[in-house]
Image: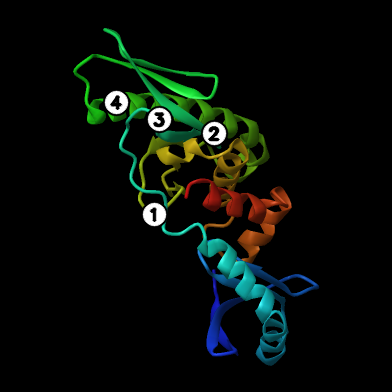
Amino acid sequence: MNFSSCSVTYGKQDIDYKVMFAARKTLEIAVQPDFNVLVKAPHGTSFEEIKKRVAKRAGWIKRQLNYFQQFHPRTPTRRYVGGETHYYLGRRYRLKICRGNETGVKLARGYFHVVAPEDANSEKIKAIMDIWYARKAVEKYKESFDRYWPCFEKYAPSRPNLKVRRMKKRWGSLSKGGILTINAELIRAPIECIDYVIIHELCHLKFHDHSSAFFTFLETVLPDWEKRKHKLELALV
């Protein structure tokens, strides 16, 4: 996607923002949880006009940036001890460790009940939960993929293969070889966020880059995609 980087001075601070031109009638200013300020403007709008609009909204932009600042630094690394909180499909559960010969995980009454041997340390508890999360990820991602595939099958010669793995910097990807890869960590987010990531990647079947045409298509398929994206970024802090 082609952006133009700009800035405007507000008080003693500069507000950096990116401009994207699109086939739209109105100018929109959005502040994202990663502190990016994005301006979507109609084709033909002058940069001077955009700068005036951003300057006029500068106070609001700073308030939004301050709001997102409260979510940083991000949550400390999990220690996998009793009482600690963990997320599944956007809901928070407390960890309760039970001792037993057979290992397993069950959700009940707001708790992750993890069964592990007496000598199991935090690394073992983590491994047990990771296996459970991975199994659930495959199950839930497939359900989402199945729901939305009919909307996209006309754009591909065959259905992509779904793959789940951990990724450090991306929620999902779609390879030219037809592999749809979704981040295993996404299983901690709400279902609507999982749907958003899968729909986003499937839109690449029609548009292979992040051009304005891609986002126009994404908005047609999923009008509230930006709200879902923001919710995802806040859900896993």
In the image, residue 70 lies at what x, y percent? 52, 60
State whether residue 39 appears in this view: no
The mark total stands at 4
State whether residue 14 appears in this view: yes
Please tell me how crowded label 4 is: few (under 14), some (14-19), or many (20+) other residues with Cα within 10 Å: many
Q: Residue at x 63, y 40 (%)?
A: 192
Q: What residue did someone put label 1 on?
A: 169
Q: Using the image, tell me which numbered label, if any, was put on residue 236.
A: none
Q: Residue at x 64, y 56 (%)?
A: 226
Q: Earlier in the sequence, mark 1 or mark 4?
A: 4
- Nearer to me, 22 or 94: 94
Taking the image as shown, residue 217 lies to the left or right of residue 163, namely right
Q: Nearer the viewer, mark 2 or mark 1?
A: 2
Q: Amino acid at mark 1?
A: Lys
Q: Find out whether the residues at labels 2 and 1 contact each other: C-beta distance under 8 Å.
A: no
Q: What residue did someone put label 2 on?
A: 89
Q: Nearer the viewer, mark 1 or mark 4?
A: 4
In the image, residue 121 lies at what x, y percent? 22, 26
Label 1 secondary element: loop
Q: Amino acid at mark 3?
A: Gly
Label 4 secondary element: helix
Q: What residue did someone put label 3 on?
A: 83
In the image, residue 72 lies at what x, y percent? 45, 59
